Image (cartoon, grey):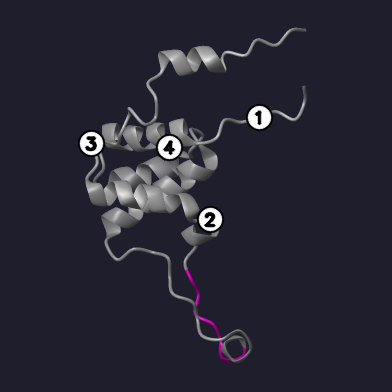
């Protein structure tokens, strides 16, 4: 069975990620999307306070990666999930961003921009 690589054709049809900025987002929102690239999925879980024995052995509880602004935190959570899962986001992730006040167009722009700037998936099989 033959394999046809359409990645070159897709790059010619789709605009370059550099030419496709997140123009619908503010500068602060663009920074949050960029910073979310370094965050792991563990940053989505709430930080629990350490008990006295854990504080004695491991030290004080580390600072929480959550943002103080609820709307910006929802954007960060959406961006973290998009950086790790690409276009295959759960419906609850999209609903959380909608509840924070983001429109479907803005959510789509974030996910699309992240999807275009992610590394393409390479199969191990030849």
Q: Nearer the viewer, residue 28 or 73?
A: 28
Q: Position of residue 89 (x, y in %)?
A: 48, 38
Residue 10 visible in rendering: yes
How far is disc 2 from disc 1 in space, using C-alphas? Answer: 21 Å
Q: Secondary structure at mark 4?
A: helix
Instruction: Return the residue at label 2.
Output: 40
Magenta part of the chain: 47-53
Q: At 77% from the left edge and 22% from the top edge, which residue is drawn?
A: 126
Decide if residue 73 is on the left or right side of residue 40: left
Height in image: 102 above or below 46? above
Instruction: Return the residue at label 1.
Output: 122
**Residue mark closest to the camera, 2 vs 1:** 1
Mark 3 Cα-neighbour bin, 10 Å: few <14, some 14–19, many ≥20: few
Decide if residue 18 is on the left or right side of residue 8: left
Q: Quadrant of the N terminus?
A: top right
Residue 114: assigned label: 4
How far is disc 3 from disc 1 in space, using C-alphas? Answer: 31 Å
């Amino acid at each position: 069975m033959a394999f046809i690589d359409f990645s070159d054709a897709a790059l010619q049809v789709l605009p370059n990620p550099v030419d496709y900025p997140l123009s619908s987002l503010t500068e602060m929102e663009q920074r949050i999307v960029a910073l979310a690239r370094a965050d792991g999925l563990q940053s989505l879980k709430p930080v629990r306070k350490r008990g006295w024995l854990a504080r004695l052995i491991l030290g004080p509880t580390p600072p929480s990666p959550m943002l103080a602004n609820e709307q910006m935190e929802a954007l960060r959570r959406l961006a973290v999930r998009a950086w790790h899962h690409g276009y295959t986001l759960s419906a609850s992730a999209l609903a959380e961003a909608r509840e924070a006040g983001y429109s479907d167009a803005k959510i789509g722009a974030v996910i699309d921009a992240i999807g275009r700037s992610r590394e393409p998936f390479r199969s191990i099989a030849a």
